[in-house]
Amino acid sequence: MSDLVAFSDLALAAYCPRKLYYRRREDSRSEPPVAAQARSLAANYDALRSADPGPYAAALAVAPAVARERLDAAADRLDDFDALADPDESHVLVRGKDCLGRVGKITPNAVSVVSHGEPPDDGVWETQSVRAVAAANAVSWREQRRIDTAYVEYPRYGAIRRLSVTGRRSAAYRRALRTVEKIDGPPARLHDDAKCASCEYRATCGVQTRTLRSLL
């Protein structure tokens, strides 16, 4: 493959290849303003852990006390917390062997991606797992060293989740990469009510979602 695949395309391919097709066709890749807010929060964990987070409180999606409690717990739990709070590089564009994109943070032992969304109850969303593996692979390629640890940060919620770059996660990354490579027309519809109901391309896609009344 001559062109490097964007991290965002890999993540979207893992979620819904057909949505990726429509987004590519529109060349719609702009990020919402809240993404920049999340990066600002991720760069100021010391302030968020203080009694008065000041101007950063307005960007939080939870109460400052909740964010502070979660970050304090992360600091106690994660060996890499100090490095994430003061990383070697932040929001840097990295080109790997197969993919490229912005890596949220690079530390001596790990990489991180920063999400503006809400974390799941446990672990990370599949799309963010694919993006994190892509980031780890790209930095590994750039620096010629193996990176087996990645983090997904949800700074608006005070949450930081650690993941290992396992064989299973790497396989999901490779599947997403193959999916992107093969897209030359509209992929098959998912017929997934949970994903399709909120999709901005639902009308264009033509998928029909069932209401609760029809299910009953």
Image (cartoon, rainbow, N blue to C red):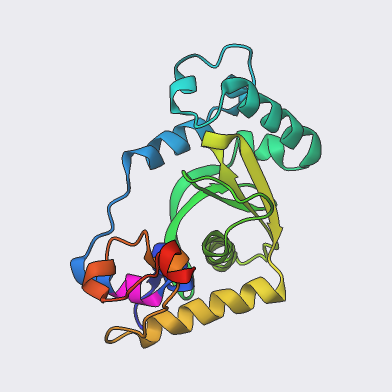
Instruction: Give the x, y percent position of residue 119.
Output: 58, 47
**Residue in the image at 28% along x and 60% along y:** 200
Membership of 181 in magenta stretch: no
What is the quadrant of the N terminus in the image? bottom left
Above or below residue 59? Residue 179 is below
**Residue in the image at 45% along x and 32% along y:** 40
Q: Can residue 176 be seen in this view?
A: yes
Instruction: Give the x, y percent position of residue 48.
Output: 58, 23
Image quadrant in which you'd find residue 163: bottom right
Q: Is residue 195 visible?
A: no
Instruction: Give the x, y percent position of residue 176.
Output: 49, 77
Instruction: Give the x, y percent position of residue 99.
Output: 45, 70
Q: Which of 84 and 191 is in front in this view?
A: 191
Above or below residue 86? Residue 90 is below
Magenta: main secondary structure:
helix
- Looking at the image, residue 76 sits to the left or right of residue 36; the answer is right
**Residue in the image at 34% along x and 77% along y:** 3
Image quadrant in which you'd find residue 179: bottom left
Q: Nearer the viewer, residue 88 or 10?
A: 10
**Residue in the image at 38% along x and 74% along y:** 4
- Looking at the image, residue 166 sits to the left or right of residue 181; the answer is right
Q: Nearer the viewer, residue 209 or 188?
A: 209
Per the rendered image, the range of residues in magenta is 17-21
